[in-house]
Image: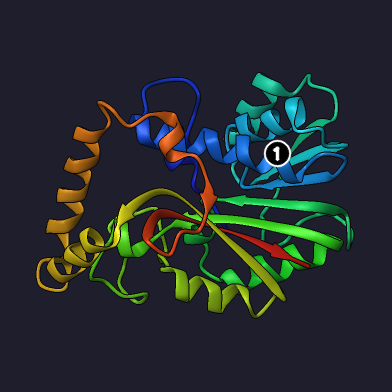
Amino acid sequence: MINTYTERFSLRGWTPPWLRYEHLTRYEWVREFTRGRRVIDAASGTGYGSEMIARTGGATGVEGFDISQEAVADAVAAFGSRQGLSYRVADATCLPVEDGSYDVYVCFETIEHVQEPDRLLAEARRVLRRPGKFVVSTPNRDVVAPGTSLQHRPFNPAHVREYNRAELEALLAQFFPAIAWFGQSPCGRRYVAGLNRLGRHWPKLPVRLHQLRKSCQALWRTREFHRPRAYDPAAVPEVLIAVCEV
């Protein structure tokens, strides 16, 4: 079961600028895959991302699913009148839809909340028709919790586990034959290596230092800096994005 409503990003209210930019630019970017396609947005939350795809992504239809009745009610109230867009209450690990129902499955900032990620991925593969795309994003543990392991309980209490790229790739490769990598908010490799050295001795210290650095850089880092781009071996993205082919 996935219930992350307390961590939901909303267009209303204040959010740290880097988080706002990361959330919005992910949905702007994913629209390059949605034209003429039927799209599912899993764990769609307050519904703003599904609405962006429906309004400007050229999709033939967009369906948002979320386990939280409150989240779905907010989404319906805000965007439910848009043609070609719907929201329903459902667990992303057990969707009330037929096999091969969608062309594109959007799964942003969700897999880190899931107790059994293999169930989520198996369900995604089931509901996608061939050829189809599963687009997933998640925080990169090497940046957000440096020096910790996959077995370490994340500092974010809403997360079950956080992945680095190698771990996420190993998980996704069990279900999808081809994976293209992208990322957001790149950091220098030396900087990340330093954070990880600190984190192995004082786990919370590099987390606080990185948050302080982001707060200072928010004064000049624009929305464009946080936009998804192809994976760069010379940098370490704070957010990992994988486009998986079925």
Per the image, label 1 sits on a secondary structure element best described as helix
What residue do we see at 78% from left, 68% from top? 246
Q: Nearer the viewer, residue 66 or 21?
A: 21
What residue do we see at 12% from left, 57% from top? 205
Tell whether 167 sits left or right of 89: left
Q: Nearer the viewer, residue 175 or 155?
A: 175
Tell whether 211 sits left or right of 100: left
Query: Measured from the top left, where is residue 136 in percent x and y?
Result: 60, 56
Tag 1 residue: 31
Tell whether 32 sits left or right of 103: left
Q: Quadrant of residue 142?
A: bottom left
Query: Measured from the top left, where is residue 87 in percent x and y?
Result: 74, 36
Tell me the crowding category of disc 1: few under 14, some 14 to 19, or many 20 or more residues within 10 angstroms, Cα based: some
Quadrant into which the N terminus falls: bottom right
Q: Nearer the viewer, residue 209 or 228?
A: 228
Query: Measured from the top left, where is residue 11 in percent x and y?
Result: 50, 24
In the image, residue 136 above or below residue 30:
below
- Kindly tell me whether residue 77 is visible in this rendering: yes
What residue do we see at 46% from left, 59% from top? 232
Query: Measured from the top left, where is residue 211 in percent x and y?
Result: 22, 44
Instruction: Indicate the amino acid at tag 1.
Output: Arg
